[in-house]
Image: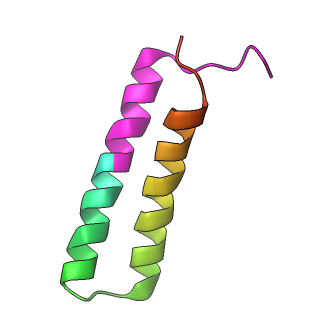
């Protein structure tokens, strides 16, 4: 597990997915959309940000 790192490209892609998910979360929240979409986009954004935060980049 000590050798598990992210390449800069993969980290950037994960961060872009987090940004897109956060934007979609806000769009659904403002339009008072379905709760399941709030959960889906919120968990996706949080999970992606946690990955980038806690897994080192080469």
Q: Give percent across and percent down for residue 17.
A: 37, 45
Residue drawn at point x = 32 percent, y = 58 percent: 22
Looking at the image, which residue sits at the far right?
1
Given the current orientation, which residue lies at the most extreme top position?
A: 58
Where does the N terminus fall, quadrant-wise?
Answer: top right
Q: Is residue 41 left or right of residue 7?
A: left
Tally the numbered discs.
0
Q: Which residues are magenta?
A: 1-18
Residue 26 position by quadrant: bottom left
Classify the position of the C terminus by image quarter: top right
Q: Quadrant of residue 41?
A: bottom left
Q: Is residue 17 magenta?
A: yes
Q: Residue at x 34, y 57 (%)?
A: 21
27 on left or right of 58: left
Q: Main secondary structure of the magenta part?
A: helix
Residue 53 in magenta stretch: no
Q: Residue at x 45, y 27 (%)?
A: 11
16 relative to 40, above or below: above
Question: Residue 34: where, in percent of width, then height?
Answer: 36, 88
13 over 23 or under it: above or below: above
Within the image, what quadrant is residue 51 found in? top right
């Amino acid at each position: 597990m000590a050798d598990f790192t992210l390449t800069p490209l993969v980290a950037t892609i994960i961060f872009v997915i987090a940004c897109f998910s956060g934007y979609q979360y806000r769009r659904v929240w403002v339009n008072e959309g379905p709760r399941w979409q709030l959960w889906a986009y919120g968990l996706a954004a949080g999970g992606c940000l946690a990955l980038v935060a806690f897994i080192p980049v080469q």
